[in-house]
Amino acid sequence: MPRAEPSTSQTALLAALRCGDEDAFSALVDAHGAAMHRVALTFVRSSAVADEVVQEAWLGALRGLDRFEGRSALRTWLLAIVANIARTHAVREARAVPFSSLELAPVAGSEHEPALPTDRFQGLDGRHPGRWVSFPMPWSTDPDHALLSAETGKLIIDTIADLADGQRIVITLRDVEGWDSAEVCSVLEISETNQRVLLHRARSKVRAALERYLTTESP
Amino acid sequence: MSAEFTCQEMVEVVTSYLDEAQAPDERQRFERHLSRCAGCTTYVDQMRETIRQTGAVPREESLPPALRERIVAQFRTWRRG
């Protein structure tokens, strides 16, 4: 079966798509489709809606081919399209639920939500206010222990799933998908500062979950 | 010279540190504290480990076949249009 050569340049690929080359299109779907689907699932919780979002994104990409100027990588361009469509759907989904909205900005007051409980540090009446009461316990490095196990992965996935929308979306794009902060800010239309607050809260909670798991003796 | 970070402040600015988003003097204060504090060194190592572990969670690496088929079918329709 003829396939797009790995060496095929972006320009040649775009030309093939415009000519209706199905093999070129299938290769593109195989290269980026799964990542687009994961991004859609980050924003919307229903897998049926995520499927719709991904289909809509591919159609949008095909219709917008002539506007793709090659300044960004094709992958970045496709992921931005799917993220924008998914965000629109997620906002609509959230509006359908009374008293709910997609919280992309940090919730008011959450900048005071501490990374760790305040009792982990000495209070103002302590000898050294703000210093650790006791140091964090180093995590087990025993290769048989959980650090390498599938359980750790599940714990991380479950912890992320329970986060507020903004925190969940930002940590997924940054740390699971590996986007840089500029890409995340641009797609979510939030400031660098907001993005960092959300990431910080999310990472602190995932670390805390790992800490509870990795420093608790097995029963 | 600005005041040194406390441990409690360190755990709140660690994300800015790891993103290299701090002003130079803040970064110096952060690193100075780190060089003298085993507790914060452990904490920063655990944040790095958390990021590494989060980046290693299993991910769906291919599209559900039915969805892939619908996307390709949609391409055929688009091509005719």
Image: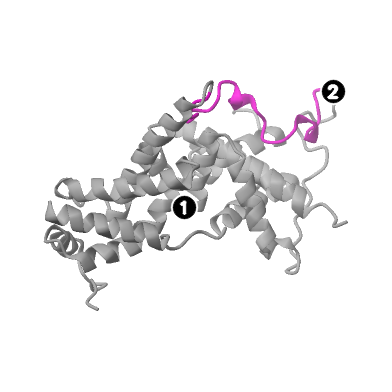
A30 or A141: nearer the eye?
A30
**Residues under labels 1 and 2: Cα distance?**
44 Å
Residue A192 percent coordinates (x, y): 44, 34
SS for callout 1: loop
Q: What residue type is labelled 1?
A: Glu
What kind of secondary structure does the magenta stretch mostly adopt?
loop
Whether B35 is drawn above or below B71: the answer is above
Q: Which residues are the magenta region?
A: A100-125
The single residue placed furthest to the right in the displayed view is A219
Whether A111 is drawn above or below A215: the answer is above
Colour pattern of the rendering: one colour
Chain of the residue that carries numbered disc 2 in the rendered image: A
Which residue is at 40% across, 58% downward?
A: A34
Residue A7 percent coordinates (x, y): 23, 72
Whether A129 is drawn above or below A143: the answer is above
Label 1 environment density (alpha carbons within 10 Å; few <14, some 14–19, many ≥20): some
Whether the residues at callouts 1 and 2 have beta carbons within 8 Å, the answer is no
What label sits on residue A177 in the rendered view? 1
What label sits on residue A61 in the rendered view? none
Which residue is at 66% across, 38% downward?
A: B11
Residue A214 percent coordinates (x, y): 76, 54
Which residue is at 50% across, 44% downward?
A: B19
Which residue is the site of mark 2? Answer: A125
